[in-house]
Image (cartoon, rainbow, N blue to C red):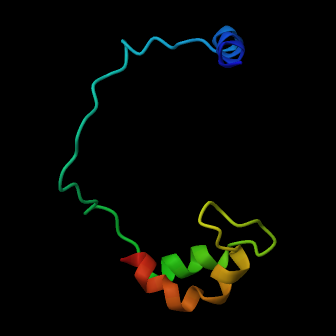
Amino acid sequence: MDTVFSNYFTSVFTEEDTSHFPPSVEYTNVKCTDVNFTVADVNDKLAKLRPDKAAGLDNLLMRFLLEIKDFINYPLLL
């Protein structure tokens, strides 16, 4: 049974050539010091969320985020 699955999947999927990927770069102590925004900016973005939209990958509903925006705007700024 295992060989049937193996034969099927090897016939469907192809192996990618990964020899041409650029080398990965490791960043340490990188800070975005030239990006400035305020609590009001965060609050404006939160206020524009549509409550009828589905939850994201974090399973937080937009309606919930709108309800607590005054409590989370400063922590999100940080």
| Quarter in which the N terminus is drawn | top right
Residue 5: x and y in percent read: 70, 18
| Quarter in which the C terminus is drawn | bottom left
Q: Quadrant of residue 17?
A: top left
Q: Residue furthest right?
A: 52
Residue 63: x and y in percent read: 73, 80
Q: Residue furthest bottom?
A: 71
Task: Name the residue nearer the viewer: 6 or 12.
Answer: 6
Residue 44 visible, this angle: yes
Q: Quadrant of residue 47?
A: bottom right
Image mark count: 0
Residue drawn at x 52%, y 91% as measured from the top left? 71
Task: Name the residue nearer the viewer: 59 or 51.
Answer: 59
Residue 38 visible, this angle: no
In the image, residue 69 above or below residue 59: below
On screen, residue 19 versus residue 53, left or right, reads: left
Residue 65: x and y in percent read: 63, 80
On screen, residue 32 versus residue 55, left or right, reads: left
Residue drawn at x 70%, y 67% as measured from the top left? 55
Q: Residue furthest front?
A: 1
Residue drawn at x 34%, y 63% as measured from the top left? 35
Residue drawn at x 22%, y 54% as measured from the top left? 30
Residue 60: x and y in percent read: 64, 73
